[in-house]
Amino acid sequence: MAQNSWVDQLKPSLPDGPSTLAHERGGSSIDVDAFAQHVLGGEYLQRQQQVLEILQKEKVFSKEKQANLSRPERYMLGLARGKRMRQLQDKHGWSDDDHEMAKYLVDEISPFQLQNTMFRQTLREQTDEAQRAYWLRRCEDWDIVGAYAQTELGHGSNVQGVETTATWDQSTKEFVIHSPTLTASKWWNGTLGKTANHAVVIAQLMLPDPSAPTTGKTRFKSFGPHPFIVQVRDMKSHLPLEGVVVGDIGAKFGYDSMDNAYMLMNQVSALLARYSAVDPETGAYRAPENRAVVYGSLTHARKRIVMAARLMLARAVTVAIRYCAVRRQFKSKDNPGAEHESSVLDYTTVQIRLFPLLATGFALHYSGKVMGEVYDRTRSAVEEEGNLSNLIDLHSLSSGLKSLSTELATSGIETARRAMGGHGFGGETGLIGLSRDYLSKPTVEGDNWMITQQMARYLLKKAKLIVSQPGLKPSNRTESTLAQYWQINCDKKLPRTSRPLDVLNSDSDIVAAFEHRSSFLTFQAYEASEVHGKGYDKLMIRLHDLSNAQSEAILVYNFYDQLSADTKLPFSTKQVIWKLFRLFALFTMSKHSRDFERSGAVPKRDLDALADDHLVDIMASIRPHAVSIVDSWKFPDYLLNR
Amino acid sequence: MAQNSWVDQLKPSLPDGPSTLAHERGGSSIDVDAFAQHVLGGEYLQRQQQVLEILQKEKVFSKEKQANLSRPERYMLGLARGKRMRQLQDKHGWSDDDHEMAKYLVDEISPFQLQNTMFRQTLREQTDEAQRAYWLRRCEDWDIVGAYAQTELGHGSNVQGVETTATWDQSTKEFVIHSPTLTASKWWNGTLGKTANHAVVIAQLMLPDPSAPTTGKTRFKSFGPHPFIVQVRDMKSHLPLEGVVVGDIGAKFGYDSMDNAYMLMNQVSALLARYSAVDPETGAYRAPENRAVVYGSLTHARKRIVMAARLMLARAVTVAIRYCAVRRQFKSKDNPGAEHESSVLDYTTVQIRLFPLLATGFALHYSGKVMGEVYDRTRSAVEEEGNLSNLIDLHSLSSGLKSLSTELATSGIETARRAMGGHGFGGETGLIGLSRDYLSKPTVEGDNWMITQQMARYLLKKAKLIVSQPGLKPSNRTESTLAQYWQINCDKKLPRTSRPLDVLNSDSDIVAAFEHRSSFLTFQAYEASEVHGKGYDKLMIRLHDLSNAQSEAILVYNFYDQLSADTKLPFSTKQVIWKLFRLFALFTMSKHSRDFERSGAVPKRDLDALADDHLVDIMASIRPHAVSIVDSWKFPDYLLNR
């Protein structure tokens, strides 16, 4: 429109965005590249660059107009992208990690998601060799497209309660899958609504009851939920097979591109994955050898969630910090004669929302890293030595951290959005999709309020052990921390630490204060439960709080420990990360200050100082580096511009 | 599909939803109809029924498939609905209240929204008689469709900083509107992106500078932002007029049906609303008589927001409580031999998320009601007696309550959603649209973090007054509460109350504790600011917290006072509402327990009891009534099924 060429000549009022950001970057002593190497590593950064270049050449991955599409259109786009991604994988010989990077950058949940994850993983881990040879190849060649159907309308968290049955038919030596009720409908199962032609279906394994009389009609008994392989759609027409009713469940809070399914089955024949668990002659049950593998894949998923949480949160914080640096509104009441309006990032009421989140990204990073290492060590111990002893520690750690990290990230993304004021409601943030899709995370892979009970019960067991076996040699940090607390406090006087802690001046004392508070809450809950016999239902809320307190102590300890161990970061950069450590820890402390006071970890005087100026002062010292810190996450614009 | 008739015969496993809800309803002593009359009133309930019947007959208002539509399609649907709503208004002689009810039930932001609100309101209040006669009729006949263009790309909260200019042209005796920069682009303006042909545009009123030399080129000076009436599109072609660049800003977090606009203007002629403010002969400025009117319409909008917040929150809680009553998952660890899995509403970890929100709905209700009455009284005083003295109280009240109530509702809607676990991510909740649209509320009509400063500065002024004038006769409850606190605590020893408070056993002591804490925080901030001379930037965070503490005290006081004054509620119903009062107040207290301890309002022992079993016990006593309580909000299924 040539008549509107006057618009093209307009400029923003000064100081504009580019000059403001250049000024911010020039004013920080952070070594952005060294910081990025420290957090992400060279291999990751190189992979990001390589995959990005490939994706950006492909029109189908452009995000420009996707926000205007309908849900059905987003699904179609998702199919096209999934197909192209598979072709690129072949063309460029992408590894699984490359493929993960591509999915991360495209930043949308693919309708083929389950094909590459749970369907393939189940075929790999839960089948015998003959099955594996046949099915895994078909899956990896995309000869078939598979989904994973576990959750039902009536049962999610309580997998043991699924109502779908798989009954052994001695005459045909096959299993027959059936949905006996409406609540047995499979529900939520990704990739199954429209895309898949096969599915792993979790159903109650119904076998002849060995304790029943052998005469008359066979009596069946459930041996619990097991995975079955079922064909659900015709390979040519893609219509549901007879006895299968399947479709898309409709709109959700996010995941527009995904075809989450409902599915009911009326006497459909199926194949038990890992066939060897049932004797084909008699229909008798043989327990599978290795339950730990199943256990392992859940903790694996949770480990990934913690590392992903940090990137999702950091992305939202990156957008918000850059915007708030550029955005100016009002002149400061303390400096009404200023030339320009203040950058809103200078307002302490904006800093208190964004800077603790900035620090949280790194807190999640260090614990995610440590959890990955624990996971790898534990897996090796299981696979190479058959040593299962650390699985329970890993499981409780993964439960507590999954819950807290997704909680912090979900609420943090929303806090960052709102810190952008009016523009935070608009699509220019690039955060709409991220925000909506991420809302699923507090629930999937273990509901956040449910799995904290696992962490808390683990701590209660440890407390019981320590009280009953005073001389016990601690086998890990949790035990030694609890044992030390108990040694000092078993006299039940006012709770106290082994020495007075100075959290305002000592970083190691901050760690000790968090561990002391968690121990205090552990033994409080132990006393309520074991000494006063309080029922479990009444304890659940404080167990939830206990798990979060312990997870916070873990985040604080790992942040401190990993940063102390580093020898490569430039001094001036590291100084700033130490400030982020203090901000994360002390901000968290101020949110739960009464815990710290009651437990005797921190004196009233110090908590008052926190509430007054201490946090404000730390934030002021972080302010000049805020833009450079978010730069260190190296998010490509392609990802941010979603 | 006859071949799938087996699906139609399936039933949910027992106990199913209808029998569970019937059982819940039978087990409560709440008189639902009496409660509904108390909260909503007969007139409201009758209007809801009448309008509902009309809407449900119209296919265009069906919500069945709207979740699958694209954003552009939602806009088209919004246009059709807006048009039909206007026809129904004529047909049934709907009042403004009837029309508001219809919009509430259709539950979508109309692309005609600004036509009926800010555009009409400005024409009504900001024009002289001749303008009003001409423009208001055209607006009300929908002869023209108007929008309201205040916010710009570069300025939202700071309206004084808008960059669009309206310069007086002495030769034509007209105003010329111009966008001098990109950041002067009008942005966010509803109804303007595609729908409107006219707009009220807020621009800097540029008039000849009276202090400039009278020779040479006229020097212009801004007299601040004023409203102008501008035609933006051709009445026949609907194309933008020459010099106007206008369009839709694209996707947002919500408001899919609304065409929020960008607009730039290149020397476009316009009409100053309330023309009398400029002398047409000389271009000299005459200040408008009554600034209070403008002030009034902002507080009016905020009053509505508080009352709307309660319904939005209550709706989400209604869905979540009914679902959690029906949903069963796991057997209780305290009762593993139970016949059925537990209703998840029996878990204390679900109750602690939903029941405080259940109570919050009523807390917002009573303060919204009181605020409405204060508003009406203040308006009459202004209009009938020219008495502006209460405007400042009302403004601070509306600022604090708008911020806190939308904060509570926004986070509460999300908490309720998550309490539904996996299904909380699905569209069957009916909450997707509500949740997305409501995300705008913490920012619009005054950003929540900004306007709390207004409430806090009001309190600081009151504190200053009380310290400087010890014998002052208090003019309202805030002043008398602060004066009483100061009388007892001006010696600056450890802060104390006039008598020991027993919040676990006395409802009036709960009120006193909240008011004491707010007074404590007020005088702390006063001391930091006035005695220690702390800069404003450093104080902002604690002023924000102070405003929330004061607003919480107001919510608690009004809840207590209104419920005490009621004489009509059946005894057994009222008993339950008192429990909701205690839960709201004590849950809020437990979130900020250290404030209450530091201020000397509540002893450590009582705060420990709260953290232990006191809240759990109150929730247990509310549990049998939860479903009946949400029934009392009388939400029609048409609204819930969105």
Image (cartoon, coloured by chain):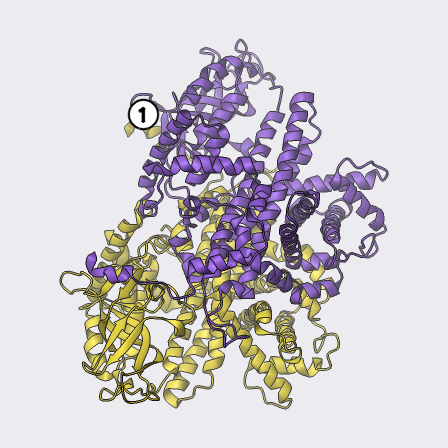
Chain colours: A purple, B yellow
B514 in relation to B58, above or below:
below
Residue B131 lies, in percent from the top left, at: 22, 80
Give me the residue at 65% from left, 43% from top: A568
Left or right of A531? Residue A444 is left
- Visible residue check, residue A411: no
Mark 1: secondary structure: loop
Local crowd size for mark 1, using a 10 Å CA cut-off: few (<14), some (14–19), many (≥20)? few
Q: Residue at coordinates 42% horizontally, 88% vertically from top-left? A: B387
| Residue A445 point in image, percent of width and height | 54, 37
Q: Which corner quadrant holds the N terminus of chain B?
A: top left
Which quarter of the picture shows residue A392?
top right
Image coordinates of residue A611 in percent, x first then y, are 66, 65
> Would you name the residue on which mark 1 appears?
A238
Chain letter for mark 1? A
Q: Quadrant of residue A493?
A: bottom right
**Above/below status of B212 relative to B251:** below
- Horizontal side of residue B294 vs B321, given as left or right: left
Q: Pick whichever, B399 or B586, lies toward us.
A: B399
